[in-house]
Image (cartoon, grey):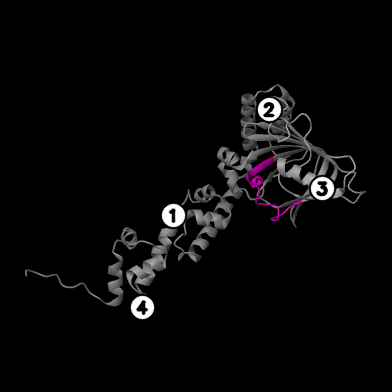
Amino acid sequence: MAALSDESMPDGSGPAGPLGTERWRVGGGHRSSAQWQAEWEDVLAATHVAFDVRFPDDRDGAGFAGSVERHRLGQLHLVDCVCTPFAGRRSTAVMGDPAEGWIGLQLVLRGAERVTRSRTQQHVLAAGAVGMWDGARAVGVEVVEPLTKRTLIFPRELVHAVSPRFADVEALPWLADRPGTRLLVRYVNALADELPELDERTAAAAGDVVLELLRAVVEPELPQARAARREALRARARRYVRAHLTDPALGPETIARALSVSLRTLHAVFEDTEESVAALVRRARLARCREDLAEPSAGSVTEIAFRWGFSDATHFSHAFKREYGMAPRDVRRAATGATRPPARIGK
């Protein structure tokens, strides 16, 4: 890890002032490019997200210099970064770190960097650019001019709690031209200027204001695209359910994990439908059981229930009767031509 300045505790936990300012510096001195590269990777992983770093060709990397300053605002971090050109790649090889739980609001103050999200999504962010990044997504960055940027980093769950619709955003937006962005930027910069005078309680309250301003900027753009994304996710969930009905463990948790979304997101996309995720699984299983019950060679009622993911025959029977108004054994008897034994009268 690059050495922290004398104004911060060696373990990164201690404050230089009331808000726990932390500082990192990389560059200078007689060290190899590989050493500077490793140290800058450590700094980025500690303060932003993890990247594989590459420096431009120069004499042993001696031309690189970077510094980061971080302030804590309750659950938020305000991070100022200054660096000379480098390239970084956040791929699956470096993902899986805690930073996947972070969302960042980034302001470019000076310089420029190129951001590549896919072969068709590439943007050069110059001074004045405002955007958001998601620690759970792969991305490439290339600082093409000496860069100064300011980033507010939020826990993902906190952002989603303020605006659940953020959970449905697949490509986080560029914000420079949105109504309200100038107010958001001015507030963030004013907050940075006032940090030395703020105590922890006031700083945390100021962070809450940032979240509300961010919601006001982004939310007006979400509804139209949001409906299409929600329907697409519901369709993916239904396809997965149909393909895995025989798995007794199939349920909301396993579906969310398989679709790479949070459990809350999965439940949210079914809120405006007639059934919950659990009800979707149950009704799909019952439908397949009914099909097999009507097939004479499909086996016994218990065999059919277990085949389609039910683990308790009594529970299956009750659920089937609630859904179709008849017991599964009655459907089975009708299919096999069996009849009830006549009732005994007297002795």
- Disc 4 residue crowd, few under 14, some 14–19, many 20+, Cα 10 Å: few
Image location (x, y in percent) of residue 330: 27, 68
For marks 4 and 3, the one nearer the N-term is 3
Mark 4 vs mark 2: in front: 2
Q: Identity of the amino acid at label 3?
A: Gln
* Alpha carbon separation for disc pair 2 and 3: 29 Å
Q: Please state which of the two labelled residues, at mark 3 or mark 1, is closer to the viewer.
A: 3
Looking at the image, residue 164 lies above or below residue 8? below
Q: Please say if the residues under marks 2 and 1 sit with CB atoms less than 8 Å apart.
A: no
Which span is picked out in magenta? 89-104
Could you tell whether 283 is left or right of 321 in the image?
Answer: right
Q: Which residue is mark 3?
A: 37
CA gap, disc 2 to disc 1? 45 Å
- Determine which of the numbered discs, if any, sits on residue 278 in the image: 1
Measured Cα–Cα span from mark 4 to mark 3: 67 Å
Gap between marks 4 and 2, in whole Å?
Answer: 72 Å
Which one is earlier in the sequence, the residue at label 4 or at label 2?
2
What SS does tag 1 mark? Answer: helix
Q: Name the residue carrying label 4.
A: 297
Between label 2 and label 1, give the one nearer the viewer: 2
Residue 303: where, in percent of width, then height?
36, 70
Q: Is residue 311 left or right of residue 69?
A: left
Classify mark 3: residues with Cα within 10 Å, few (<14), some (14-19) or many (20+).
many
